[in-house]
Amino acid sequence: MTPAVFLDRDGVINVDHGYVHTPDTFDFIDGVFDACAYFQRQGYLLVVVTNQSGIGRGLFSEAQFQQLTAWMLARFEQEGIHIDGVYHCPHHPDDGCDCRKPAPGLLRQAIREHDIDVARSLMLGDKAADMAAAAAAGVGRRILVRSGQALSHADAGQADEIWDSIREASSLTLCHPKP
């Protein structure tokens, strides 16, 4: 079993401009490539888990999401980084599905499909919903980043750590998988 870094997309990988669905509105967060390369060198799988309610709201299509995802993955590959999986919830928040974070469905699917050592894994997210999904899935370390949404005291209380941005990863020595 291999540990993974679960990454929320909007607010962690890219600037959250709201319903980002085209490359011209997709701005990578400064340091994301260095951080992901660092995690990869440490032996982590890289898995994106993202709510995409813009699909369920009719703001963009599943095909547009897939096109943007292919573009994003190609950009990571250009930087020598392999993303092991991208899991998304296309549902409207009122649909009551089990894949929309804070539900753990996306993470559990990735854990099964990639034989992930969940106890040694990390979740990097910018919302309390990311932390709740990670806790429900048994993810060992939950890290809230400030590069996305404004954080409340309650949000911060759900995280094991708070970073200003994903770019902090490559400067920390404590990101090694736990034994």
Image (cartoon, grey):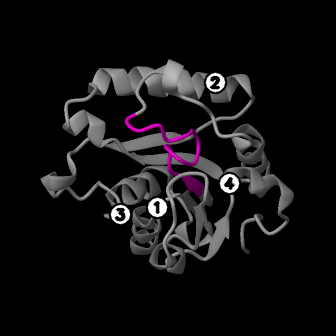
Q: Position of residue 153 (x, y in %)?
A: 51, 78
The answer to if 83 sits in the magenta stretch is: no
Helix, strand or loop for disc 1: loop
Helix, strand or loop for disc 4: loop
- Alpha-carbon span between mark 3 and mark 1: 14 Å
- Alpha-carbon span between mark 3 and mark 2: 28 Å
Helix, strand or loop for disc 3: loop
Q: Indicate whether 130 appears above or below 147.
A: below
The residue to which callout 2 is attached is: 75
| Amino acid at dot 2 | Arg
Q: Indicate whether 26 appears above or below 49.
A: above
Could you tell which of marks 4 and 2 lies nearer the N-terminus?
2
Name the residue rendered at 72%, 73% in the picture.
Answer: 178
Could you tell which of marks 3 and 4 lies nearer the N-terminus?
3
| Amino acid at dot 4 | Ser
Q: Which residues are magenta?
A: 5-19
Residue 179, by quadrant, is bottom right
Helix, strand or loop for disc 2: helix
Q: Residues within 10 Å of mark 2 (few under 14, many from 20)?
A: some
Name the residue rendered at 74%, 50% in the picture.
Answer: 167
The residue to which callout 3 is attached is: 104
The residue to which callout 1 is attached is: 127
The residue to which callout 4 is attached is: 165
Could you tell which of marks 4 and 1 lies nearer the N-terminus?
1
Q: Quadrant of the N terminus?
A: bottom right
Q: For the view shown, which residue lies furthest in the left direction?
A: 95
Q: Indicate whether 140 appears above or below 41.
A: below
